[in-house]
Amino acid sequence: MGDMQSLFWLQPAAALVFGYLLGSIPFGVILTRLGGAGDLRTIGSGNIGATNVLRTGRKGLAAATLLLDGLKGWLAVVLVAQWSPIDAPVAAVGAFIGHLYPVWLGFRGGKGVATLMGVVLALSPLSGLVYAVAWLGTLALLRVSSLAGLAAAFSAPVAAAVFDQFDYVFLFLAFAILVLWKHRANVDRLMAGTEPRIGGGTKGG
């Protein structure tokens, strides 16, 4: 009986740890260093995500960071699903938390928007498509990165409900709340009309 209980906990624990380790790879920091752009944590907002990489003026590095941050979330879910489909959401949690709080950077990570897109795409492709449209559409319309990220994050649980994937509604909602928490300083600036737009200026003009 003890061996069965150990096995029952071993698989989700392994999925969580695997997802966390994969999600905690700080691609923004790695790419900016390799690209000679310095330590990303000392640039702009100090955030390790693609938006801050863009502040280095290196659009290629920013695009690569965006892609890799999304890919690690997607890959964590897909790889775990190969050997234990029931534990894929656990791997998603691990990857997302790993990006937000990576052990390698003293638990000071990114805001999770790109990684969350990868996770959502892997768990629910239709919700992932809605996420991408909400993110890119809001970004193109308003050119405010934080607002686009928040719109995308909260579109995921709504999309899951619309597509009758209720198993994911509360998981995606929890992820969205964490994204909101990581953006709390941005929300303050949005309310004050001082949040910068991509390309310069503030939301308030």
Image: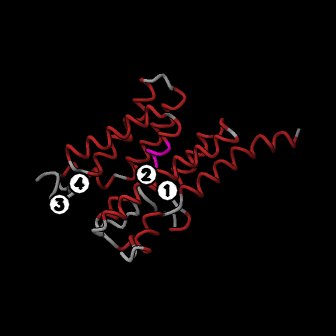
- Chain part drawn in magenta: 115-119
Q: Earlier in the sequence, mark 1 or mark 4?
A: 1
Give the label on residue 99, or none: 1
Callout 3: few (<14), some (14-19), or many (20+) C-alpha neighbours within 10 Å?
A: few
Callout 1 secondary element: helix
Kind of residue indicated by mark 4: Arg
Point out the tag, 2 or 3, that comes first from the N-terminus: 2
Give neighbour class at mark 2: few <14, some 14-19, many 20+ (Cα, 10 Å).
Answer: many
Picture quadrant where residue 44 is located = bottom left
Distance from Cα at disc 2 to Cα at disc 3: 23 Å
C-alpha distance separating marks 1 and 2: 6 Å
Disc 1: CA contacts within 10 A as few (<14), some (14-19) or many (>=20): many
Type of amino acid under label 3: Gly
Assess whether residue 71 is covered by the magenta stretch.
Answer: no
Whether tag 3 and tag 4 are in contact, CB under 8 A, the answer is: no
In the rendered image, which residue does mark 4 sit on? Answer: 189
Mark 4, residues whose alpha carbon is within 10 Å: few (<14), some, or many (≥20)?
A: some
Residue 144 x/y as whole percent: 24, 50
187 over 38 or under it: above or below: above
- Tally of numbered tags: 4
Name the quadrant containing residue 155: top left
Label 3 – label 4 distance at C-alpha? 15 Å
Q: Which residue, given by chain and number where applicable, does mark 2 sit on?
A: 112
- Label 4 element class: helix
Which disc, if any, is residue 200? 3
SS state under label 2: loop
Residue at the location (37% across, 64% down)?
61
Quadrant hosting residue 43: bottom left
Under mark 1, the amino acid is His
Residue visible at 39% across and 49% down? 181
Q: Residue 18 vs residue 104: left or right?
A: right
Determine the CA span between mark 1 and mark 4. Answer: 23 Å
